[in-house]
Image (tube, grey):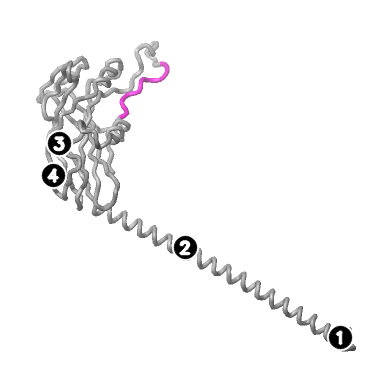
Amino acid sequence: MWKPTNPTELYTLGLFIFTVVLAVISAIQIYLFIQSNRQANRASEAALRASEAAVESNSISRQIMIAEQRPWINHKVGIGGPLSYSDEKGWYFPIDYSLINIGKSPGTMVSFYAQMIPFNISVYPKQSIVNNVPQGNPLPGTNIEEELQNICKIPEDKEWVKMGFGQILFPNESKKGVLNIQANGELFEKAKEHEGFSGQFLILICVKYGSTFNDKMYRTAKSYHLWKSVDGQRITLEGETISASELALTESPQLFTKIIE
């Protein structure tokens, strides 16, 4: 084993030992720093997850609170008079309506919309049936779900289709009225060319309203079938006047014919 024999060698040995010890201490410090940093990162991630969970929990709690305390506005409609047609006005129909807030807080900016359209069912064109076997694709019928979405998108500034816009409806409060619907004549002209016209009209209803809890607009929409109550008779697209006693208005039974938000 080598041993220092003079002061210079002894100094060199001491310096070497000091350097090795310093390197070992530095390595230990680096290791401890890395471990500490990892633990700090884990703690930070855990705190972030806890914070996100708390925010999500608060958001869920608020949503539950709003669902329990928000306004819920229901509507009922009925026949308000005869279904009539004239060359000047086209199809014209009055409906009785009532709105009631069955929720626990006021409904704000309450607006009532109604529209009347022909009801077409999906059929194969006569010329596409060969030897009683349909060929190709059928003519699409009225998409009630899409039509409800369209009427609920009507801007609130359309004065001719709204009733009660901007009003407040308090819990258990109800409002009644009559809305005169003047139909879009273009839709009925197109229905004359559709082989699947059912002989019935659709009355589309949408109620839009807000709440005091947020800026969201809520919607309740339904579709109703308007038809002749006399067995076997259909509404003719050429135009006629049908008394209220000869009409029936029933809620559509199909799936996807309601919007409740």
> In terms of sequence position, does the residue under pointer 4 or pointer 2 come before the other?
2
Name the residue carrying label 3.
Answer: 97
- Residue type at mark 3 is Tyr
| Mark in the foreground, 1 or 3 | 1
Q: Are marks 1 and 3 in contact (CB under 8 Å)?
A: no
- Which residues, given as a range, are shown in magenta? 135-143
Measured from the top left, where is residue 18 in percent x and y?
Answer: 76, 82
Amino acid at pointer 1: Thr
For the residue pair 215 and 77, the one nearer the viewer reads as 215
Based on the picture, tell me whether residue 120 belongs to the magenta stretch: no
Q: Which residue is mark 1?
A: 8
Where's residue 195, x and y in %?
A: 30, 16
Q: Would you place residue 83 above or below residue 43 in this image?
A: above
First in sequence: mark 2 or mark 3?
A: 2
* Sequence-wise first label, 3 or 4: 3
Which residue occupies the foreground of this view, 11 or 150?
Answer: 11
Disc 3 versus disc 4: distance between alpha carbons? 10 Å
State the residue position of label 2: 48
Q: Earlier in the sequence, mark 1 or mark 3?
A: 1
Q: Residue 227 falls in which quadrant of the image?
A: top left
Q: Amino acid type of disc 2?
A: Leu
**Residue labelled with disc 4:** 174
